[in-house]
Each structure stands twice: as structure tokens, then as C-alpha cells.
Image (tube, rainbow, N blue to C red):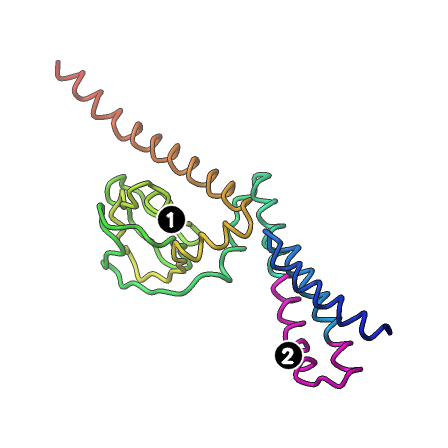
Amino acid sequence: MNWIEIAGYLASALVLATFCMKTMIPLRAAAICSNVAFIVYGFYEELYPVLMLHAILLPLNTWRALQMLRLIRRVEAAAKGDLSVDWLRPFMKEAHLKAGEILFSRGDHADRLYMIIQGDVYLEQIDHTLRPGDLFGETGLFAADHTRTQTARARTDVELLWISEAELAQICFQNPGIAFYFLKLTTNRLLANAARAAASAAPEARREAAAL
């Protein structure tokens, strides 16, 4: 057995190994190594279909691996207190609203997460305005009944990014650390909403006390 045959067997073993892996980074690393081994094997054995296939797959697997590594670093930063959501943008799609248009109403089915790029969105039930850079919609998305708790209305013309529940679930499955980010985000959002509700209720309570 010469070294070219060894490269072929190694490439096949690495492909088999990818089917046994449960996380994306080791899978991509094994796929990249198998691409290199298949390129060597295909070149020296003059198996040009194999060579062409893996010459295409090699940069694709490398790019996907780099994307995932960048995502992991950003999630780790988020877990340490940085709540920036810039890492989510490449996975989101664009949407636009006119001033006064309702994005979703209280009680609607929640199936998307949103981020504001430009404009203001008003949450009617808690009398709060969201600004550019704000991420919202996660409470209904992660609720057991998938129901919106607020009515979101565009105060101005709004440019949004959104990601579906299924796409977000895939990202979280590939990198469970992302779930920690959303846990912090949702907790901070609920605490902020509770503080706003308490602040708005205090003047009413004082007025009622004064009337007694």
C-alpha cells in the first residue's frame, strides 16, 4: 500500500468520523481534513470528479468553520456581560414598516425575533419605545404558548432585521452557549418591564391614597 492509497483511506475514515460527531466545530474540522486528503488522492489518482468536488467543498467548509468560531467568540463575550447582538445580524433578514403600521398585536402567535436598524417601535401595553439596536420579540418566542405579550407599532418608518424561530433554534442547537445570551436578555427585559410597571403604578397609588 503506497501513501496515495493511505490518503484515500484516511479521507474516507474522516468522512465516516463526521457522521459520529455531535457538535459543529469538530465536524467542520474533520470535513476540512477529509477535503484535503481527497484532493491529494484525487489529484494523484487522476480522479477528477472527486478532485473538483472537494476543491469546492474545502473553501465552503473553511468559511463555515470561521463563521462558527466568530459566533462562539461573540457568545462567550455576551456570557461575560457584553449584550451586543451584532453577531446575529448575518443570520437575519430585512423588513420594513411604515409609520403607524402594526408589526404584531398582543395575543398573536410569536414566530420571529426582531432587531431595529432604523426608526422607533412603540410597545403599547407597557408604554415603552424601542430604539435602533434594540432586540425584541424574544419573550413571546420563548414562551410555552408562543403568544405575543405586547402590541408593537411603528412610530416612524422602521427598518428591521428578523430571524425565524426555526433558524434561531438551529443556531442555538449548534452552539448551546447562545441560549445563555438569550437567558440574560430575557431576564433583563422582564426586570426592566417590571420596573416600568411599578413606576407607572406608583403615581396612581398616590392619587388613590390622597383621595381617601
Q: Give the quadrant of the C terminus.
A: top left
Is 145 covered by the magenta stretch? no
Type of the residue with mark 2: Leu
Rendering quarter of residue 207: top left
SS label for mark 2: helix
Classified by dominant secondary structure, the portion drawn in magenta counts as: helix
Using the image, tell me which numbered label, if any, was put on residue 53: 2
Residue 201: percent from the left, percent from the top? Answer: 25, 27
Q: Which residue is found at the position 73% from the left and 65% from the top?
A: 33
Q: Is residue 134 above or below residue 204?
A: below
Q: Are marks 1 and 2 in contact (CB under 8 Å)?
A: no
Please, is residue 58 above or below residue 107 in the view?
below
Q: Indicate left or right for 114 with 36 as reference.
A: left
- Say if 32 sits above or below 84 in the image: below
Q: Nearer the viewer, residue 53 or 103?
A: 53
Picture residue at 70% right of the left edge, 85% below the top:
48
The boundaries of the magenta stretch are: 39-65
Q: Say what secondary structure mark 1 lies in.
A: strand
Q: Name the one closer to the observer, 210 or 17.
A: 17
Q: Nearer the viewer, mark 1 or mark 2?
A: 2
Question: Of callouts 1 and 2, which one flags the residue occurring earlier in the amino acid sequence?
Answer: 2
Q: Which residue is mark 1?
A: 136
Choose between 97 and 49: the one closer to the eye.
Answer: 49
| Residue ID at (52%, 55%) | 86
Q: Residue furthest front?
A: 1
Q: Is residue 62 magenta?
A: yes
**Quadrant of residue 42 in the image?**
bottom right
Instruction: Please provide percent x and percent y for residue 151.
Output: 24, 48
Amino acid at pointer 1? Phe
